[in-house]
Image (cartoon, rainbow, N blue to C red):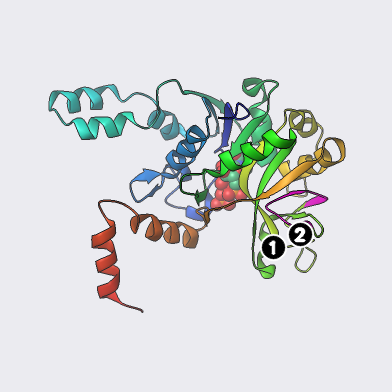
């Protein structure tokens, strides 16, 4: 297994305003898809790819994320006393042994780039992964973070996950230009955040997985805020291209944008249809219900 992703950063300090009022007091990342909160899927992906240090960049109302990954002493004692071993295993499984969590506060939501920069003192001078938990990706046995790490091991350059989106949706994403190179990996020529309609250099959209060299921190420190006052990770990556280069990687896996209600519902249906205890009953329900 690769050493390149010992540390993964989870920026979870956003406001989650698209899910209000659900996210007024509860972090978006704690909303469950079937029976696990979004953040758990993200952590499982990082750990499956070999990460041992998990860094959460949190904000106000995000305390539940810390509690989720802490030991639930009373709950575990009760379950042990009443011999509910399966439930006890379930409660303990949120974090495998040997994996550590650290939390750092982003006191104001000044953008994804700023959130990543907040993790600098904890990451140190090594390459690291970034996972946005609301981009849920079902990649089966090969987590996308692992796919990026395998690519990184070949080149030593930063890697950014991308997927093809319909041309009329490119304005919602960061978009990369790779010219006419064939994938899945390609050197990025340029990258732009949320290009105006009709201005996107391609339909290859950035999805929330990055493997970055630590140089990104110095670039973030000197990246100017955009018109909305946010420091964009995309803008720092654009500068990284000039210095070190970076690759895009068209991953294998099904992506759900769980930052939107529609994507969240789609993920819920697909994960329920794969869940060992639910898939049969849920499929029967959908069949009986029929088309609208
Ligand atoms: P989003 O653009 O989805 O923003 O952030 P959001 O605030 O979470 O949600 P909405 O748009 O208000 O509904 C993408 C990722 O970047 C993180 C978010 O937590 C999310 O994982 N982020 C964004 C930060 O950690 N800090 C920020 O200042 C901005």
Ligand 1 found in image quarter: top right
Q: Residue at x 40, y 22 (%)?
A: 97
Q: Is residue 186 magenta?
A: yes
Q: Residues within 10 Å of mark 2 (few under 14, many from 20)?
A: some
| First of labels 2, 1 by sequence position | 1
Q: Position of residue 174 (x, y in %)?
A: 71, 53
Would you say 202 lies left or right of 69 here?
right
Quick one: 108 or 279, which is closer to the camera? 279
- Report how far apart the C-alphas of labels 2 and 1 lie in the structure: 7 Å
Say if 275 sits above or below 212 in the image: below
Quick one: 110 or 173, which is closer to the camera? 173
Would you say 44 lies left or right of 167 here?
left
Would you say 34 lies left or right of 188 here?
left
Residue 144 in view in this figure: yes
Instruction: Name the residue that disc number 1 marks.
Output: 170
Residue 61 in view in this figure: no
Q: Residue at x 31, y 25 (%)?
A: 72
Instruction: Name the residue that disc number 2 marks.
Output: 195
Q: Quadrant of the C terminus?
A: bottom left
Say if 62 sits above or below 163 in the image: above
**What's drawn in magenta, residue-wise?**
181-191
Q: Position of residue 99 (x, y in %)?
A: 46, 23
Q: Position of residue 75 (x, y in %)?
A: 24, 27
Label 1: state its secondary structure: helix
Q: Position of residue 94 (x, y in %)?
A: 37, 32
Say if 278 sits above or below 215 in the image: below
Q: Is residue 155 magenta?
A: no
Quick one: 4 or 217, which is closer to the camera? 4
- Cβ–Cβ under 8 Å for marks 2 and 1: yes
């Amino acid at each position: 297994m690769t050493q390149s992703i010992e540390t993964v950063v989870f920026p979870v300090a956003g406001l989650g305003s698209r899910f209000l009022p659900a996210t007024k007091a509860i972090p978006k990342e704690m909303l469950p898809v079937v029976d696990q909160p979004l953040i758990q899927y993200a952590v499982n992906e990082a750990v499956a790819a070999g990460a041992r240090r998990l860094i959460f960049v949190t904000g106000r109302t995000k305390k539940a994320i810390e509690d989720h990954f802490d030991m639930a002493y009373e709950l575990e004692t009760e379950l042990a006393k009443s011999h509910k071993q399966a439930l006890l295993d379930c409660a303990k499984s949120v974090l495998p042994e040997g994996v550590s969590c650290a939390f750092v506060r982003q006191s104001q939501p000044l953008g994804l780039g700023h959130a990543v920069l907040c993790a600098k003192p904890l990451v140190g001078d090594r390459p690291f992964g970034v996972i946005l938990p609301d981009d849920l990706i079902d990649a089966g046995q090969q987590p996308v973070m692992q796919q990026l790490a395998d690519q990184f091991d070949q080149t030593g350059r930063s890697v950014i996950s991308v997927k093809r989106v319909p041309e009329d949706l490119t304005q919602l994403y960061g978009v990369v230009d790779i010219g006419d190179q064939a994938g899945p990996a390609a050197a990025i020529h340029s990258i732009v955040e949320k290009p105006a309609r009709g201005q996107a250099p391609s339909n290859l959209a950035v999805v929330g997985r990055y493997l970055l060299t630590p140089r990104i921190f110095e670039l973030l420190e000197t990246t100017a805020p955009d018109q909305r006052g946010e420091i964009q990770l995309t803008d720092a990556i654009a500068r990284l291209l000039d210095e070190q280069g970076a690759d895009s990687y068209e991953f294998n896996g099904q992506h759900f944008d769980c930052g939107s209600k529609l994507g969240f519902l789609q993920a819920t249906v697909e994960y329920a249809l794969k869940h060992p205890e639910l898939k049969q009953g849920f499929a029967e329900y959908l069949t009986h219900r029929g088309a609208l």
